Image (cartoon, rainbow, N blue to C red):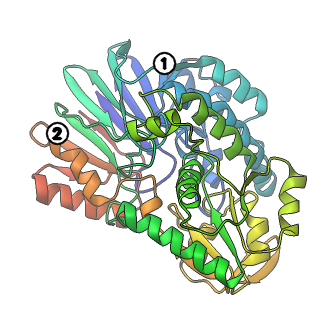
Amino acid sequence: MRLTFYGGAKSVTGANYLLESGETKILIDCGLGQGSNYAEKHNFDPFPYSPVAIQAVFITHAHIDHIGRVPKLYKDGFRGTIYSTPPTKDFAETMLLDSEHILGEESKKHRRPPLYTVSDVKEVVKFWQGKKYHEKFSVGPFEIEFYDAGHILGSASILITAEGKKIVFSGDLGNNPAPFINGTEFLEDVDYALIESVYGNRIHEKLNERKNALEDLIEETVKSGGTVMIPAFALERTQEMMFELNELVENGRIPRVPVFIDSPLAIKLTMVYQKYSEDPLYFNAATAKLIEMGDEIFNFPGLKMTLTTEESKAINDIKPPKVIMAGSGMSNAGRILHHELRYLSDPKSSILFVGFQAEGSLGRKILDGEKIVRLFGEDVLVKCKIKAIGGYSAHADQPQLLKWIEPMKHHLKKVFVVQGEEREATPLAQKIRDQFAIDASVPMSGDSVVL
């Protein structure tokens, strides 16, 4: 087998790996590179392989940095089959259509033709098939099996067997225990592994610490009469925060103030969560029990979902204190920008980051302490309180990443550390070498190895 790294190498985003055996070529993920812009300029470049020659694409999960260039692949000639778990398939069309709208704006800004069109999205999803966890199937010489990655609903690590060798692509691994989905599954008899490294050199807060930190920030901001802004990814992070706020509100741990979910995408995706909420394959036992007892886990007093533009604008008419959760998660697009324009300069308000902020993103600039940021052509003073709770990341931290490697340590010949910036990936690779005496490297984009 030959493995080539075409994305996600020394970068958090843009996951894209080519695996070849004989004449069969398959891809694992085909994501959008993201950073200072929603779509970086290199996303518009031609693929470094022939899309026509790709027989199948295997998707680990539905975040745009893992699926965002699939419609471009179709536009450029791909006509193979796309495989993922059923929830990922259900998320895909909604995610890609939302992305197409933002990408259209990026295309105009960079004076380039659109990366893909609505028609490309509508057509490519016709080639998409859902496969459940542990439902083995084959494409050419490759045998494939999905394992629960515990990252978001339907996320998978992908085990591929060919030529008598086994290789696993971690996808994004979950921060366990997650509030409502099942945890990460572990593998043992594997020869090669690709492991993500978003938090490869960090340790998250404990579960109770992150909830206490969320409670404290909301209480402090409400007391001061301010607004809590939460830039949140529409897929998983928003639902996770809704689940946590539900528990805090229903147990009287935070004051009952208006909480707005100001994201049409998040609202649509929450419907997919509700579709699978009674399936033990995806939701954990504790959550199943809550649902059985009649708890609406994504609803609580004071919650309002603002689907239309008019409803979103009306949030301004509600005087603080209030909580606003909106996309995008790195403040590089979406409705959150309008709220940041209004409240970043308010010392009574606060902005809470609950996910990774990539280099160059507006969220990263705010988090790194920039005092003036640019929004809609205006210079905005940053005077509000800034807080990050890493424990709410859906990504595993360093100890959890090492825990995923440990059951495979007696069989692994090589580990490739991917999907992280170099300052996160390199320490993780060193830890794997030191702790398990396994060869571990941080590949560069374009690197190719024979397994």
- Compared across the picture, whether 43 is left or right of 260 comes to left
Spatial CA distance of label 1 from label 2 is 29 Å
Q: Amino acid at mark 1?
A: Gln
Label ID, residue 408? 2
- For the point 46% across and 58% down, the residue is 393
Amino acid residing under circle 2: Met
Quadrant where the N terminus is found in the figure: top left
Q: Position of residue 407 (x, y in %)?
A: 16, 41
Visible in this render: residue 413? no
Q: Position of residue 320 (x, y in %)?
A: 77, 74
Q: Residue at x 76, y 34 (%)?
A: 117
Quarter assignment of residue 232: bottom right
253 and 411: which is toward the camera: 253
Q: Quadrant of the C terminus?
A: top left
- The residue tagged with tag 1: helix, strand or loop? loop
Residue 320, numbered circle: none
Label 1 neighbour load within 10 Å: few <14, some 14-19, many 20+: some
Q: Is residue 90 above or below residue 313?
A: above
Residue 25: horizontal and vertical position, in percent?
42, 23
Asked where in the image residue 95 lies, by quadrant, the reply is: top right
Residue occupied by mark 1: 55
Q: Is residue 26 left or right of residue 120?
A: left
Q: Earlier in the sequence, mark 1 or mark 2?
A: 1
Give how far across and how far down residue 216 sits, in percent.
52, 75
Residue 402: in sight, yes or no? yes
Residue at 52% x, 47% y is 14
Label 2 environment density (alpha carbons within 10 Å; few <14, some 14–19, many ≥20):
some
416 or 177, which lies in front?
177
Judge depth for marks 1 and 2 and give the one in front.
2
Residue nearer the viewer, 324 or 337 = 324
